[in-house]
Image (cartoon, grey):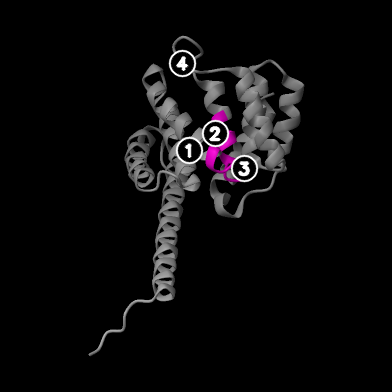
């Protein structure tokens, strides 16, 4: 069998096909991370979440090492690490929170929309909950900036409005908190995150009743 030499056009087509195949695999892995994160955070008992999120974070870290400039991967790495930090709690969670912040800030450098606002919401929650200087990086003004940026991108988001409402309540701004909690209850779930968004809608409803 006589092999024809590889032309520039054939090489370009082969390279494009390889790139598309790699991107497709990357999307599948991100989708799998998202689905498992939703299962852990909405269906598993609270006392089992830390270990499960730790295992998921290891997988997200490995995927981020393989795709260091992929904003979707870094966003999900940050979300998963932030969730693990929340499940762990206490000062011991600060290292995880710092890793989450670094991943999310890098994701925003690559994608200023922050994956439709998701990176900004998670950063806002991190800045809101982390201890302040000198122990941590918590800062209420930065937290509000992150939430407001997320609201500019996705004003009807359940997660955006719920976490901003919780922030406002912590700041003693109860009337504003009530307004955003109502927006969360009436918000629009994302097709790709319907399970977790509907769980947050229920949390927002309970939160609103307690205000």
206 left or right of 105 in image: right
What residue is rendered at 38% in x and 36% in y?
A: 49
24 left or right of 173 in image: left
Q: In this rendering, does residue 118 appear at all?
A: yes
Graded by Cα atoms within 10 Å as few (under 14), some (14 to 19) or many (20 or more), the crowding at tag 4 reads: some
> CA separation, marks 4 and 3?
26 Å
Give the mark toward the camera: 3 or 2. Answer: 3
Do the CB atoms of the residues marked 2 and 1 lie less than 8 Å apart? Answer: yes
Q: Which residue is mark 4?
A: 136
Q: Secondary structure at mark 3?
A: loop
Q: Earlier in the sequence, mark 3 or mark 2?
A: 3
125 left or right of 175 in image: left
> CA separation, marks 4 and 2?
16 Å
**Residue 147 location, x and y as percent?**
64, 30
What residue is rendered at 65% in x and 26% in y?
A: 145
What span is in magenta? 109-123
> CA separation, marks 2 and 1?
6 Å
Q: Secondary structure at mark 2?
A: helix
Q: Nearer the viewer, residue 34 or 74?
A: 74
Q: Secondary structure at mark 1?
A: helix
Q: Is residue 115 magenta?
A: yes
Q: Which residue is mark 2?
A: 122
Q: Earlier in the sequence, mark 2 or mark 1?
A: 1
Q: Earlier in the sequence, mark 4 or mark 1?
A: 1
What residue is rendered at 52% in x and 26% in y?
A: 126
């Amino acid at each position: 069998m006589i092999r024809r030499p590889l032309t520039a056009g054939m090489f370009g087509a082969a390279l494009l096909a390889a790139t598309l195949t790699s991107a497709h695999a990357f999307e599948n892995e991100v989708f799998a991370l998202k689905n498992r994160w939703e299962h852990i955070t909405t269906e598993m008992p609270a006392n089992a979440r830390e270990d499960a999120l730790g295992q998921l974070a290891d997988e997200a870290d490995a995927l981020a090492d393989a795709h260091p400039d992929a904003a979707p991967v870094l966003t999900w790495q940050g979300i998963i690490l932030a969730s693990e930090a929340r499940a762990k709690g206490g000062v011991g969670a600060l290292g995880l929170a710092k890793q989450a912040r670094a991943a999310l800030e890098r994701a925003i450098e690559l994608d200023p929309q922050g994956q439709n606002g998701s990176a900004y919401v998670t950063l806002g929650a991190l800045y809101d909950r982390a201890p302040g200087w000198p122990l941590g990086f918590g800062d209420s003004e930065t937290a509000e900036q992150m939430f407001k940026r997320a609201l500019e991108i996705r004003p009807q988001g359940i997660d955006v409005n719920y976490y901003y409402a919780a922030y406002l309540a912590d700041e003693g701004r109860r009337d504003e908190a009530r307004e955003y909690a109502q927006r969360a209850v009436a918000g629009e779930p994302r097709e790709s995150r319907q399970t977790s968004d509907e769980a947050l809608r229920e949390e927002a409803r309970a939160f609103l009743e307690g205000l």
